Image (cartoon, grey):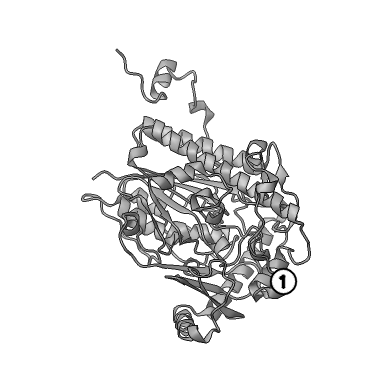
Amino acid sequence: MKQPNIVIIMADQLAPHFTGTYGHPVVKTPHLDALADRGMRFDAAYCNSPLCAPSRFSMMSGQLISRIAAYDNASEFSANIPTFAHYLQLMGYRTCLSGKMHFVGPDQLHGFQERVTTDVYPSDYAWTPNWELADERIDKWYHNMDSVREAGVAASTFQIDYDDEVAFYAKRKIFDYAKHKAEPFCLVASFIHPHDPYVARPEWWNLYSHDEIDLPTNTLSREAQDPLSRRVMDGIEASTVAVTDDEIKNARRGYYANTSYFDSKIGELLQALGEAEVLDNTVVIVTADHGDMLGERGLWYKMNFFEHSARVPFVVAGPGVTHGVTDKSMSLVDLLPTFLDLAETDTIKRPDLGVTLDGRSLLPLMQGQEDKSEAIGEYCAEMTGHPIFMIRRDDFKYVHCDSDPPQLYNIKLDPYELTNLALDPEHADLAASFAKEVSETWDGEALRRDVIATQKQRRAVYQAMIKDGGVHWDYNPPRDASQEYVRNHMDWTVAAATNRFPPYKRR
């Protein structure tokens, strides 16, 4: 049995609700649609923490954030935590990262043998929250309503520059693997779109008209919100900065446009895999690190466990994957054990893991079989002073925070989560069962103490790092131009032949 290549195409802040693939009547995602048409679409896929870095660290490690202290966007991803890149390398794979992974700390590879771009956000401790002042905004933390009010068109932004570079180097790497027959390989192409700011190039903006853009289905006032949502509204200034319906439509139009832009990158990468003659033996996964509320419930961005924030698209296609749709709940920590199953053969066994995994293999669901329906989430970052836990099992979602009232929703019957069943007498036994499970699974107070302790440590280190000009951990991709294209020490005919794909066949 041949080991399949694995390609993960990752968006930043993409809620499945805002894709044509998942039924949105306006948003155009033809390449994701086509991938779903030949693969498996997961309709209840969740991130494990609705914030960029924690979500990505848990995905890479197959472990929940409380296990690896990946609490917020300035938590260090420790070099001693094995990732799927480490394991796949041990199983004979070439591993490469193109794009964002928001690694924090001096280790900027985490098992990837190659990293062909830099990251887009800081890799130091600058964005460390302070749970002892939980209601205060982080200095330089740009999430506010400016992204909504300033949405529109631009010929160039740093986000567009970045994603164009990510796609270029990912495609180049695909052809490099093909030229040198370097299979199997695992390539992660991780883009920043459609993450705010909601600014798009004209060709994507003009895919949509202002009149066809839908307003949020439900908008709640601050007074009608749960305590966490009120804190989030305050943190992003949504409770003090009013936005008009036209501004909301502009923001959503920019988001839809950038979703179509991201979809075009899916198409580019799939085309490259096809032209490199490796598509038939490649498992392709398209997903995101978390969603975006995009004005639903009066909220924007993420940082909560409502569906638009915590759910992610998850479409997989390739050898051995059945065509279909599953409503079984799963989460990003399930990727690592899935990759181990995909990579294992009769002669190549999985390495000693050395850690406890929190995920499960998705191979049964990918093959159309039955499996359990469960996803676990944790949040330990901005706008709270206590850990928040989420359990999605079957039709129900339970959310617990020591400082806030519990929440229980029937997602199947109440997809917009408007009716909290936690205090409903008819659901008392279920709510009590979830509450008991939370108390037996997590020690919330001990976790809170650890979060605060790491915040203090990181703030102290950061103050030293920025003194006298600062020390940077930001990744600089190695590049030796003397070995590229054609140089004096090369025979140009040899260089031309070895870098042509498919290779020229002499008659």
Please provide percent x and percent y for residue 156: 68, 38
Observer-nearest residue: 227 or 494?
227
- Graded by Cα atoms within 10 Å as few (under 14), some (14 to 19) or many (20 or more), the crowding at tag 1 reads some
Camera sees residue 119:
no
User: Could you tell whether 286 is left or right of 507 in the image?
Assistant: right
Q: Which residue sits at x=49%, y=20%?
A: 487
> What residue is pinned by disc 1?
222
Asked if one can make out residue 65 in the rendered structure from this viewpoint, the answer is yes
Q: Which of 282 and 65 is in front in this view?
A: 282
Residue type at tag 1: Arg
Q: Where is residue 136 in the image (x, y as percent from the top left)?
A: 72, 69
In the depicted view, which residue is nearer to us: 187 or 482?
187
Q: How many marks?
A: 1
Left or right: where 297 falls relative to 479: right
From the viewer's perspective, tell me whether residue 103 is left or right of residue 229.
left
In-front residue for pair 436/418: 418
Quadrant for residue 420, please give it: bottom right
Residue extending furthest toward the left? 346
Q: Where is 159 relative to 146, above or below?
A: above
> Where's residue 298, x and y in %?
68, 64
Residue 275: x percent and y percent? 40, 31
Where is the N terminus found, in terms of image quarters? top left
Q: Name the image quarter holding the C terminus.
A: top left
Q: In this view, does 132 lie above or below 436?
A: above
The residue at 73%/61% (across/down) is 139
Name the element at disc 1: helix
The single residue placed furthest to the top in the displayed view is 507
